Image: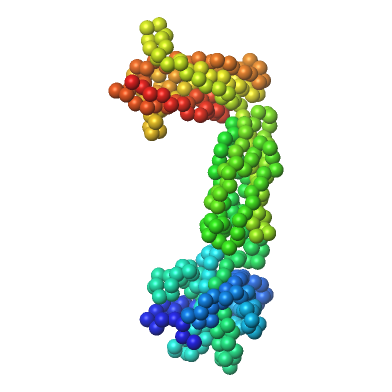
Amino acid sequence: MNYFCKQHRFVVMKVFVKIIAVAALLAGSVCAQAQNAVYTFLFDSIKTSESEDFVPGTGRVVIYDNLTVSISGSKAKGKPINYSFKFNSLVPLKGVLGFKLYSDINVDDKKPYLFVSYEGWMADYNDKSSGHFLALYDDNKHNIATMEACLDAIKNSTGIFRNFSSEADRELPLTVNGYNTGKVFTVPANGGDTVYPIRTKTGKMVCDTKIGDYTATSDSYWCEINTKTDAAILLRTSANTTGYERKATITVEAGGKTTTVRVSQPSCTAVVKNVWVEHNKFSGLVKGMRIHFDFETYNMRGRTGECGAYFFFANGQKLMDYNYQYRALDGQVCVCTNFTPGYDNTSYNDVQLFMPYSELHINGSATCKFYVQIAIGGQYAISQEYSFTYN
């Protein structure tokens, strides 16, 4: 059998050289190792010639840490495949879900080889850039005929690289924001929407793998899955006004496997409840905008805070102050006032801030925005953004 194009054999031979070099380093430690599975390939389709379509087939290629390879499975209406051999080195594989199995006879020593293409695996082999290979071959020279028959049965098989470093690692096929378990995500005390990417361990979206669809659930009313796509979940949390930290568990399931992460939310110190604006109002002889808002504070009795409105252009660029009148520490245009709650939980209704138009420092007309911010107890409560046009 000679599936590979001759003009690309130099690529394969480079792999052979690397394998032999690594073998010398591993030879002294192999004998003492137990036979534990390191990599497992599950193939699910078989093509016995280039002109033939893929036909259903199932099987697995297991590589053990003592350099033994076990191949088993069957093809539709075909004889069972059951074969094992040892190879010279264990070359680490990159973590990709897809692979393709090739087989060929080396032109120099006439040995049969099994090639695992584990990068660019769906590309045409004639493309020089496609694929990196792990070449496996039988050390038992008198068994070449059996090896050839086995490889011929599985050549061009495709499937999923199911585990990445050990058998135990197969239990968690998905990650949430890059983590598969044991991670605690902290969400803002005031709540809001947070997007968490859902990926396989290789970074692929679920729709690009054979894992299939996934489910995502929360065990807490204040933390819900608002949106779920192939790429991510959008987690919506409500403000925590309980006075203590609270936790929720997000469970992601796919292919019968489960990934669980925790969500932690500290108790908030303040919440902006409502904001409204009156334009073209006067404070004495000065024309401007009067901003009204309601807010609440929690467990902050006797502690001084600051509430204010911060201004910027519609594109997100901050409006900057030039006369040191209405400004934040970084120079952004704002108008602020201090407050000190008189109770553990205090409600402020219709707090008013007056912003002179002249202090926006705008020449001509522009579309602008502002938000209201409450700063107290080392935390910040921020409202949504509100747009207005300055003429």
> Relative to 268, is 16 above or below?
below
Quarter of the image where the C terminus is located? top left
> Relative to 143, is 344 above or below?
above
Q: Nearer the viewer, residue 228 or 329?
A: 228
In the rendered image, residue 320, in percent from the top left (x then y), is placed at 36, 26
> Relative to 50, is 296 above or below?
above
Q: Residue at x 55, y 84 (%)?
A: 152
The answer to whether residue 101 of the structure is visible from this angle is: no
* Snapshot quadrant of residue 167: bottom right
Q: Residue at x 46, y 71 (%)?
A: 132
In the rendered image, residue 170, in percent from the top left (x then y), is placed at 64, 63
Q: Nearer the viewer, residue 204 or 133?
A: 204
Q: Nearer the viewer, residue 145 or 231?
A: 231
- The residue most toward the top is 284
* Snapshot quadrant of residue 270: top right
In the rendered image, residue 215, in percent from the top left (x then y), is placed at 64, 51
How many marks on residues? 0
Identify the colour scheme used: rainbow
In the rendered image, residue 122, in percent from the top left (x then y), is placed at 48, 69
